[in-house]
């Protein structure tokens, strides 16, 4: 059923857009237009930032609320999101093509987990402490909310990634202007409704869907005090440049090309490890930044590893993202499908061997479907091993010993995720320690709200989640007594 929205949620009200520009949302399952929302432009962003500033700074404004009151408000928001959980998962899958079996977890449930985690954390955190000082006088150290946060999110997991920004920001006492990606806008309206129903004060959460111009305006806006960005490395560099020029704090969560290192003692029984392996390499139709899309296979077991991934990829049920049994849905857009197909073509031309997939699945001509594709005999210098494809495409690269595997894993522009597959936990941890990446999993990968998440090298700057993710929304002030 088609949906249409006419307003933005700004300053606690549903306000009319400043222009009649619209964003059309296209179903990745069918290629048809399924709805539209107003497109935010500079004037809409200006209004949202002004309302966020007011909510932050007015007498008794959000930044003055007690930690307990803020925690309770976060929990009310989580409860309202619980009520909308199924609708949220459905709305995201409907727009971005990610199978509903996964959005139920990442979009319908994860935001509430993150909100409740930060509600708990802010209750126990001392925002001000007195230290003895070494010059004979005490020092008071305060954590002060950084101010108005401009949050920019992509389409692949909009609510999960949004919560990683707004939950710690609100917990810290910041207010927020959230700019969703044009591909996923309707879920942001559910979030706005939840914020309204949770009685968050007007202006604490403001939501303006828009494109990159609206995003760039939010980044450069003199009224935003910090930018939290998740998206492509290309856009991240531009955002980082602007923030550098303005000396504005910024967190950048960007792309990846992580390695899944299969050690020679790994248990390769698909019945046992299949689900974890799938989640670490092919989840969300391959559209997750941290996935291990470079599979590093020991030469001693190379054929076995190729068989394993070929079986895994070819067994995924492909279909409509709203079907509970679907494991691989369509890519988000025709542009994304073209991009992924371009990489598959480059892999073939480069001489890598397709062991499964490589084309479009039969009988699904209307949407943006691409088969899960496995390339064997890939060299780490090949384009398909170096660039982020952001689709269901895996490259299997052979290695000699553990040192060789680690060297290949680290020979990448990126450093976001990665996994080590082994039957020896200590050996896995030893290898994980040497992988140059912000996050590594042993026989498993799933960002935990209690642990800092974020990349190094071209994968980003700063951390989200964990106490570190909360710290990113404070500035520190010392008072000498
Ligand atoms: P994108 O960079 O094109 O867009 C992301 C968001 O940034 C959108 O809201 C977009 O409108 C906005 N934007 C684009 N250019 C901008 C600019 N110059 N100034 C301000 N805002 C701008 O990325 P995408 O295609 O939507 O998302 C896919 C990318 O996101 C992949 O590279 C993926 O790896 C990355 N990603 C990273 C993480 C992470 O946590 N590291 C998580 C998910 C996705």
Image: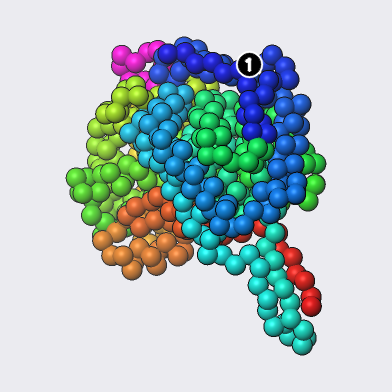
In front: 128, or 111? 128
Q: Give the range drawn in magenta.
A: 360-370
Magenta-colored segment: predominant secondary structure:
loop
Give the residue drawn at x 63%, y 45%: 228
Is 175 situated above or below 48? below
Q: Mark 1 points at which residue?
A: 22
- The residue at 63%/21% (across/down) is 7
Q: What element carries label 1?
A: strand
Looking at the picture, how far across and down is residue 328, in whole percent?
A: 34, 29
The picture places residue 240, in percent across and down from the top left corner, at: 70, 45
The residue drawn where x is 64% and y is 33% is 12
**Which quarter of the image is occupied by the C terminus?**
bottom right
Decide whether residue 266 is among the magenta residues: no
Q: From this viewpoint, is residue 104 visible? A: yes
Q: Where is residue 294 in the image (x, y as percent from the top left)?
A: 42, 45
Q: Position of residue 161 (x, y in %)?
A: 52, 41
């Amino acid at each position: 059923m088609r949906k249409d929205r006419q307003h933005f949620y700004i300053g606690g009200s549903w306000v009319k857009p400043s222009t009649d520009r619209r964003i059309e949302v296209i179903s990745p399952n069918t290629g048809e237009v399924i709805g539209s929302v107003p497109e935010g432009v500079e004037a809409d962003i200006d209004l949202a930032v002004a309302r966020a500033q007011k909510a932050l700074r007015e007498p008794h404004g959000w930044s003055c609320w007690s930690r307990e009151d803020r925690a309770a408000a976060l929990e009310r928001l989580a409860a309202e999101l619980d009520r909308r959980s199924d609708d949220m998962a459905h709305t995201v899958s409907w727009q971005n093509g990610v199978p509903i079996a996964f959005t139920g977890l990442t979009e319908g449930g994860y935001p509430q987990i993150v909100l409740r985690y930060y509600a708990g954390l802010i209750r126990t955190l001392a925002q001000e402490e007195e230290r003895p000082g070494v010059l004979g006088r005490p020092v008071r150290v305060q954590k002060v909310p950084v101010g108005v946060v401009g949050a920019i999110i992509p389409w692949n997991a909009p609510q999960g990634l949004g919560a990683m920004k707004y939950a710690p920001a609100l917990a810290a006492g910041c207010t927020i202007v959230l700019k969703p990606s044009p591909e996923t806008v309707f879920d942001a309206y559910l979030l706005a409704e939840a914020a309204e129903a949770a009685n968050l004060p007007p202006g604490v959460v403001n939501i303006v869907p828009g494109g990159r111009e609206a995003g760039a305006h939010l980044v450069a806006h003199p009224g935003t005090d910090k930018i939290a960005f998740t998206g492509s490395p290309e856009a991240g560099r531009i955002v980082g440049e602007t923030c550098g020029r303005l000396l504005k704090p910024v967190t950048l969560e960007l792309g990846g090309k992580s390695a899944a290192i299969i050690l020679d003692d790994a248990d390769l029984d698909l019945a046992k490890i299949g689900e974890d392996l799938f989640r670490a390499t092919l989840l969300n139709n391959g559209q997750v930044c941290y996935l291990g899309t470079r599979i590093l296979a020991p030469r001693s077991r190379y054929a076995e590893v190729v068989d394993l991934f070929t079986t895994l990829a070819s067994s995924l049920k492909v279909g409509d993202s709203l079907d509970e049994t679907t494991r691989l849905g369509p890519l988000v857009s025709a542009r994304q499908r073209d991009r992924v197909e371009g990489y598959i073509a480059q892999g073939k031309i480069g001489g890598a061997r397709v062991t499964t997939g490589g084309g479009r699945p039969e009988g699904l001509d209307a949407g943006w479907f691409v088969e899960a594709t496995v390339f064997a005999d890939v060299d780490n210098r090949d384009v398909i091993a170096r660039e982020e494809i952001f689709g269901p495409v895996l490259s299997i690269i052979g290695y000699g010993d553990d040192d060789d595997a680690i060297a290949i894993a680290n020979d990448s522009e990126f450093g976001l995720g990665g996994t080590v597959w082994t039957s020896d936990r200590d050996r896995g941890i030893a290898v994980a320690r040497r992988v140059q990446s912000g996050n590594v999993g042993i026989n498993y990968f799933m960002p935990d709200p209690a642990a800092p998440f974020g990349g190094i090298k071209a994968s980003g700057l700063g951390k989200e989640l964990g106490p570190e993710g909360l710290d990113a929304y404070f500035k520190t002030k010392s008072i000498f007594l």
